[in-house]
Amino acid sequence: MKKKNLQKISRRDFLRLLGIASLSISASRCAPLLEEEASPPEVKPQEDVETAQTESPSADEIEAEYDALVIGAGIAGLTAAYHLRGHHIRVLERADRVGGRTLSGTHEGYTYAKGTEYLGEPEGTLAKIIADLGVQMVEIPSPMDAHFHNGEFYWGGDGIALSYIQEIGLREYNRFMKTMQGAYAEYDDLPETDFDSELARLDDITAREWFNSIGVPEALQSAYNVTAKGLFGATLDEISALSAIPEIAFDFEDAEAIEDVEEDLENTPNQKGEHSESYSCVTGITEITDAIAEELGERIALGAQVTQITRAGEQYIVTYEDEDGLHTLAAGVVILAIPAEIALRIAASVLSAEQKKIMGQIAYAAYLTVALFSDEPIFDKAFDLAAPEGYFFTDVYDATWIQRHYEDEGDAGIITVYIAPQSYKDRSLLDLSEDEILNRVYESLERIFPNAREKVSGYDIQRFPYAYPVFTPGAYQRIARLHEITSGSLLLAGDYMIYPTFEAAAESGALAAEKAADELG
């Protein structure tokens, strides 16, 4: 996660802005929430988790031995394997491709994202891998963002600021900006989060409770509730206030207080001088995951569904199934770079009771993306159009935006709509038929773009059962404890270990690889 260089404010002003001084939060709640009475509502009873068989295969059934096995070839697993490629390793991925939730399709010469859309400016682990592999990143052209609000379009940073100021006034807008900047200046991602800090108390309450305590106007709360659903698959009433800070603060990076609305703001799609400070590759983020996979080569086994992980002496025994049947491998180190819920199913016999308890509290939001193809563009004035509350989707992306800017491809139109649940607890999106999904998309889409349905010539629907790990109140404390108790030869990686973003997942893979390398010597 990118750490902004924001100006510090005084501690007294900082606490006042954040409303921490007025919150009735017991200091004892900053301890890890592991007691039964502290478990949040989403905790799954252990009997609901499918438990792996504990009977290990015999020695003569083991086909090969490795230094390390990485389970999962999303960005976390790929990053872990990349850092361990000097050892004898194998990556087992159940899908027929790498990338996890980072995937893309092609249409009429364009590559369109079906999952991960963009990044902040890469740094740290991810930046080094990108440089090592020669992947070319490009800044997303402006205007990157647009809002549709009260029947009007607002373009770029200027237009979006104007839409908020019209609703809440200039003074409230500047105050909110200052609060978010001050909060992020004090923020640190897991596992570096300082739980002795005042800011850490925001992990104990929801983002809605925090917003109410500091007097955030309802118009902003409504807008950021949609943002929360789009970024986390959960509402302001469900996510930890601490988890909301990085993404909200990103909207105000390097921003200065607005003094004169008429002189400082212009609502026009022609904002070529504005830098988005967001990045992708010309044909999407899959260029990164594909480049890592190419470097790893035959170390990756696709279509390999791991069914069981057990322990035999100093080794882990991993059983997986592919089109040729069942296979058994052994390794001294295993990295589970898969959603926590899946890890519980296949590795219950080798995880500790405390690990299983914490991982069982990690809920995942479902998500859909729908790419719509047309002979002429439906929307091509910005990269990302945010919809208001009450629409079936949260965002409409011009999927040709980057490639058309840098390569000047053809005239075909592709938009991708991102559909989040109304609550992370609601998984009904996964059960909708294609016709139901399309009809609901068109109903909302035509409230913005009349007759859009008539222009659509095809579609591509993607369903994500494990789109986002939801950082409910107490999540940072629970996961910090998970980091503390996870070491040695069985390691965990994934965005649920740091933060639900591509960059954080990569960092978690690097952290797991570092621990694995120490174990392997």
Image (cartoon, rainbow, N blue to C red):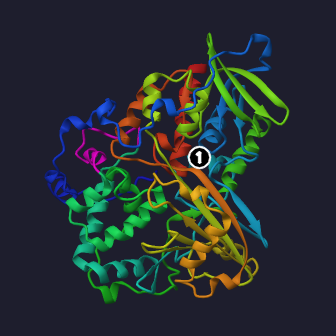
Q: How far across and how far down the image is residue 424, in percent?
A: 46, 53
- Using the image, determine if residue 247 lies above or below residue 63: below
- Quarter-of-image position of residue 457: bottom right
What residue lies at 57% left-to-right and 69% top-to-bottom? 140
Q: How far across and how far down the image is residue 335, in percent?
A: 60, 30
Question: Nearest the camera: 225 or 390?
Answer: 390
What residue lies at 44% left-to-right and 48% top-to-bottom? 470
Left/right of residue 32 with respect to residue 142 in the rendered view: left
- Quarter-of-image position of residue 334: top right
Q: How many marks?
A: 1
Left/right of residue 176 with respect to residue 371 in the rendered view: left
- Residue type, numbered disc 1: Lys
First to last magenta residue range: 190-205
Quadrant (top left, top right, bottom left, bottom right) of the C terminus: top right
Q: How far across and how far down the image is residue 417, in percent?
A: 59, 69
Question: Nearest the camera: 344 or 300?
Answer: 344
Q: Which residue is mark 1?
A: 128
Asked whether the viewer can see residue 253, the reply is no
What residue lies at 68% left-to-right and 15% top-to-bottom? 56
Q: How far across and how far down the image is residue 195, in percent?
A: 28, 38
Magenta span includes 203: yes
Under circle 1, the secondary element is: helix
- Using the image, determine if residue 495 lies above or below residue 89: below
How crowded pointer 1 is (Cα within 10 Å; few <14, some 14-19, many 20+) is rated as few
Question: Nearest the camera: 306 or 381?
Answer: 306
What residue lies at 47% left-to-right and 29% top-to-bottom? 356
Magenta span includes 420: no
Asked whether the viewer can see residue 285, the reply is yes
